[in-house]
Image: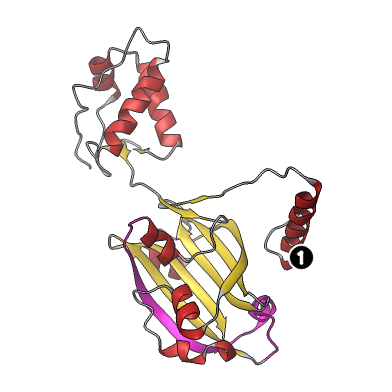
Amino acid sequence: MGEQVKINKVSTIDHASPLPYYFQLKELLIEEIKKGRLKPGQQIPSEFKLCEQFKVSRTVVRQAISSLVQNGYLSRAKGRGTFVTKPKITENLFQNLSGSYEDMLSRGIKLVTRVLEQTKWDADGEILEWLKLEQGEPVIKIKRLRFISSEPIALVTTYIPYKLCAPLLEENLTNQSLYNVLEEKYALRIAHGRRSLEAVSADKKTSALLGVKKGAPLMRLNSISYLEDGRPIEYFSALHRGDRSKFVVSLIRVRDHSTAQVDKKFISDLWDTGMVSP
């Protein structure tokens, strides 16, 4: 059981404020979490103690806690209490075409990679279709397990046409960006791509690698990337832990007819490639 902690005595609810009490309590608890006074794994005070400290009803406390559970700040353990959760790792889904290593590094997060497989592989089925290869053409298959603070976060399997960069088989990809290697060493500049996201459950092998129970929720990110001349250069499928990851999508508002036509064509292309369903 996690250690139950006390809420900062300086934190108070303004009973004269027009803001609802539950909202004020929720914001106070979020502040405690963000400032590190409530740490992941710690048990928050009981409903009774929160009622007593902040001079509010149990209904107010329950509403605040329910909101925090829904937003991922807290989690309930039946018969044990309510605990602070680990913050989810945020990744950008569509706004920037970057690899996980680059994305995390830009935000000061240390991402550690363990390369599980880096081999020449005879592609088949959908891999041939995604990369527009003929039957029998080989690819470089790279399987990597990603860690943050010694905790496994994602399992990524990448496929790259062998004919475009055969020496990649010998590269050490433990602590460097694959995209940087492709661009700087092999002059393969990625120009654009498409990504899709779907919910799946962990099978026995994946659950063991990611440290979750079999059947646990995962988010699968599929991606196809293209060179400036339109040739496919990379297809990957990444399985992210559902309890430790969230994705941010940037949206744009279509304001004119020409942009709308481009947008419709983009969606149509996604349907044609199977990246999304109509």
Residue 220, percent across and down?
Answer: 54, 61
Residue at 71% x, 62% y is 270
What range of the chain is rendered magenta? 107-135
The residue depicted at 57 percent of the width and 56 percent of the height is 94
Is residue 77 shown above or below 235? above
Q: What residue is rendered at 73% in x and 59% in y?
A: 266
Q: Nearer the viewer, residue 22 or 201?
A: 22
User: In the displayed structure, would residue 236 be above or below residue 19?
Assistant: below
Residue 12, above or below 248: above
Which sits in the foreground, 95 or 67?
A: 95
Badge 1 marks a residue whose secondary structure is: helix
Residue 126 colored in magenta in the image? yes
- Amino acid type, residue under disc 1 in the picture: Asp
Total marks in image:
1
Q: Is residue 277 left or right of residue 174?
A: right
Give the farthest residue toward the top. 16
Q: Which residue corresponds to mark 1?
A: 272
In the rendering, at what x and y percent does residue 92 appear? 50, 55
Name the quarter where the C terminus is drawn: bottom right
At a point 26% along the width and 26% down the height, the residue shown is 46
The type of colouring in the image is secondary structure
Q: Quadrant of residue 132?
A: bottom right
Q: Residues within 10 Å of mark 1 (few under 14, many from 20)?
A: few
Is residue 80 in view?
Answer: no
Asked whether 130 or 207 is in front, the reply is 130
- Give the answer, above or below, for where 228 lies relative to 2: below
Classify residue 53 as left or right of residue 167: left
Is residue 185 visible in the rendered image? The answer is: yes
Is residue 141 within the magenta segment? no
Across and down, in percent, residue 275 comes to: 67, 63
Image quarter hosting the N terminus: top left
